[in-house]
């Protein structure tokens, strides 16, 4: 079942956000960049994410209203370079597939154009992505093996490990303090 354009009107606002930002509130790209990005989207992305950017329920996530698209540009650049494998949550729905990367297929200026296009398309209102940023991320992630996972992109894997380590250290310190206090009584 394909999502319809009406779905874009039903995307819930994130907590604490009163209204979707207006297009003029972001650094918008030149019409040449948008045109190039649209062409690349139609060529490489719309087969899965659909011509309206709303994806296919249960199979391919939407581009419109996705935090993966409008969040930190480095995250989107990593996804476009190396791909993304599920499970991943978008707009409350879960998707468990594999999106191929385009590291060896598209130049920095092309990844910049498609990223800018989808970040500023319809309800999406995020800043442009410039080719030098793509170059920096490409170099920094050159050794990354295959598609990213949601956990790796969100940094939750490392965050959880640190939370567990800190909890263990705190527990040990509390137990040690209790044992010392008992010896003094």
Image (spheres, rainbow, N blue to C red):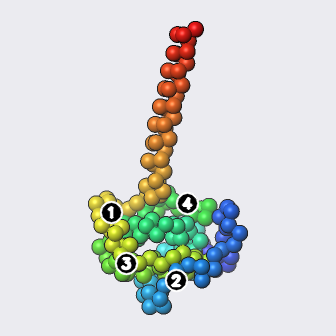
Q: Name the residue under label 4.
A: 89
Residue 39 in view: no
SS class, disc 3: helix
Q: Mark 3 points at which residue?
A: 131
Q: For the point 45% across and 58% down, which residue is it?
A: 153
Q: Earlier in the sequence, mark 2 or mark 1?
A: 2
Q: Which of the numbered marks, if any, corresponds to residue 85?
A: none
**CA–CA distance between discs 1 and 4?**
23 Å
Dot in front, 1 or 3: 3
Q: Earlier in the sequence, mark 1 or mark 3?
A: 3
**Tag count:** 4
Q: Mark 1 points at which residue?
A: 141
Q: Earlier in the sequence, mark 4 or mark 3?
A: 4
Q: For the point 41% across and 78% down, which residue is it?
A: 130
Q: Residues within 10 Å of mark 2 (few under 14, many from 20)?
A: some
Dot in front, 4 or 3: 3
**CA–CA distance between discs 4 and 3?**
28 Å
Q: Position of residue 135 (x, y in %)?
A: 33, 72
Q: Earlier in the sequence, mark 3 or mark 2?
A: 2
Q: In the rendered image of this protein, does residue 59 appear above or below residue 175?
A: below
**CA–CA distance between discs 4 and 2?**
27 Å
Dot in front, 1 or 4: 1
């Amino acid at each position: 079942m394909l999502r319809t354009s009406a779905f874009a009107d039903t995307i819930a606002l994130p907590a604490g956000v009163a209204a979707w930002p207006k297009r003029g509130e972001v650094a918008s790209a030149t019409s040449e960049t948008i045109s190039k990005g649209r062409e690349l989207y139609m060529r490489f992305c719309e087969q899965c994410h659909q011509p309206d950017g709303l994806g296919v329920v249960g199979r391919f996530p939407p581009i419109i209203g996705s935090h993966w698209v409008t969040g930190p540009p480095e995250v989107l650049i990593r996804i476009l370079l190396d791909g993304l494998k599920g499970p991943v949550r978008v707009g409350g729905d879960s998707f468990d597939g594999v999106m191929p990367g385009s590291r060896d297929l598209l130049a920095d200026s092309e990844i910049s154009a498609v990223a800018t296009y989808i970040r500023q398309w319809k309800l999406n209102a995020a800043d442009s992505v410039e080719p030098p940023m793509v170059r920096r991320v490409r170099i920094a992630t050159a050794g990354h093996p295959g598609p990213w996972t949601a956990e790796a992109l969100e940094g939750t894997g490392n965050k959880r490990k640190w939370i567990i380590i800190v909890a263990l250290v705190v527990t040990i310190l509390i137990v040690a303090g209790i044992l010392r206090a008992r010896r003094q009584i």
